Image (cartoon, helix red, strand yellow):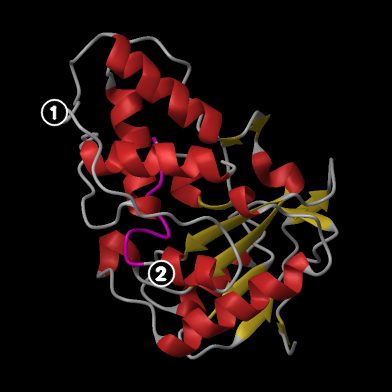
């Protein structure tokens, strides 16, 4: 692949080989602003790659080094996933500055880049996630407009569709066995959500993050039948 070299000083040694791939959006008004910040020593943030809307790919940090992209995070038992992840920033203003669909050239470039990265590292489909998956209380990116289904159809990541599960929607404030089972399912998939049987604010944040990735038609933090059905289907496919 062809990369535009834009080295960032914001990295340090890895703690483990890359086994997680985290997709972000830049959440800034322009790609130029985002790249400048990711290269600013004072900002203390970075990523391995930035993908512009026209499909150009900038390489900021070598894959063999730890970039500072995920912050406080968790996925499938691993905390602070920067140590064993690769971060891809996708240029998009985000929810704060005018969230919009990702252009075709950009999506194609992301798919190609993910495939290129996976040719070098052992990254399972279930470990290709969004920033909101690893930090659901803090982050919304890359958000519900990112075409996760298309990425999975290209062979990268998980995607399922299923008829709605029976039962009424479950939301914040509810308690009981159904909430406990829901939390256990999200924990098994990879989220940091120890089952308590109480649908609290943390559960709402995880449901919303799950919906942004796997149920983008409805992002409200309420576990309706289709949200629950897709969670069950994902667990059956290897999540």
Residue 111 shows in this picture: yes
Residue 151 is inside the magenta segment: no
Q: In the rendered image of this protein, does residue 170 appear above or below residue 45? A: above
Circle 2 is placed at which residue position? 147
The location of residue 46, given as percent across then percent down, is 64, 60
Residue 140 is inside the magenta segment: yes
Name the residue at 75% across, 65% down: 118
Depth check: give the residue in front, 208 or 181. 181
Q: Residues within 10 Å of mark 2 (few under 14, many from 20)?
A: some
Mark 2 vs 1: CB contact within 8 A: no
The location of residue 192, given as percent across then percent down, is 51, 27
Q: Considering the image in quadrants, where does the C terminus appear?
A: top right
The picture quadrant where one finds residue 56 is bottom right
The location of residue 211, given as percent across then percent down, is 32, 47
What segment is highlighted magenta in the picture? Answer: 137-145
Q: Is residue 3 left or right of residue 105?
A: right
Total marks placed: 2
Name the residue at 45% across, 84% down: 53
Q: Residues within 10 Å of mark 1 (few under 14, many from 20)?
A: few
Circle 1 is placed at which residue position? 168
Name the residue at 41% across, 78% down: 30
Q: Is residue 189 left or right of residue 116?
A: left
Element type at marker 2?
loop
Residue 134 shows in this picture: no
Q: Considering the image in quadrants, where does the N terminus appear?
A: bottom right
Element type at marker 1?
loop
User: What is the spatial separation of the Cα atoms under label 2 and label 1, in whole angstroms?
Assistant: 28 Å
From the image, give the main secondary structure of the stretch colored magenta.
loop
């Amino acid at each position: 692949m062809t990369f535009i070299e834009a080295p960032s000083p914001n990295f340090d040694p890895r703690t483990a080989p890359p086994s997680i791939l985290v997709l972000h959006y830049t959440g800034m008004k322009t790609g130029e602003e985002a790249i400048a910040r990711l290269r600013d020593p004072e900002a203390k943030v970075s990523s391995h790659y930035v993908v512009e809307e026209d499909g150009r790919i900038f390489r900021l940090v070598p894959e063999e080094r730890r970039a500072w992209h995920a912050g406080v995070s968790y996925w499938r038992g691993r905390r602070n996933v920067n140590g064993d992840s690769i971060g891809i920033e996708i240029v998009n203003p985000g929810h704060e500055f005018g969230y919009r669909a990702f252009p075709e050239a950009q999506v194609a470039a992301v798919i190609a880049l993910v495939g290129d990265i996976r040719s070098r590292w052992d990254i399972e489909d279930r470990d290709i996630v969004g920033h909101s998956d690893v930090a659901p209380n803090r982050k919304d990116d890359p958000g519900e407009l990112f075409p996760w289904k298309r990425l999975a159809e290209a062979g990268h990541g998980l995607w399922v569709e299923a008829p709605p599960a029976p039962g009424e929607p479950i939301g914040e404030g509810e308690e009981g066995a159904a909430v406990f089972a829901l939390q256990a399912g999200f924990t098994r998939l990879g989220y940091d959500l120890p089952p308590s049987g109480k649908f609290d604010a943390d559960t709402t944040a995880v449901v919303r993050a799950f919906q942004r990735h796997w149920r983008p038609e409805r992002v409200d933090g309420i576990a309706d039948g289709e949200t629950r059905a897709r969670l069950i289907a994902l667990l059956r496919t290897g999540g």
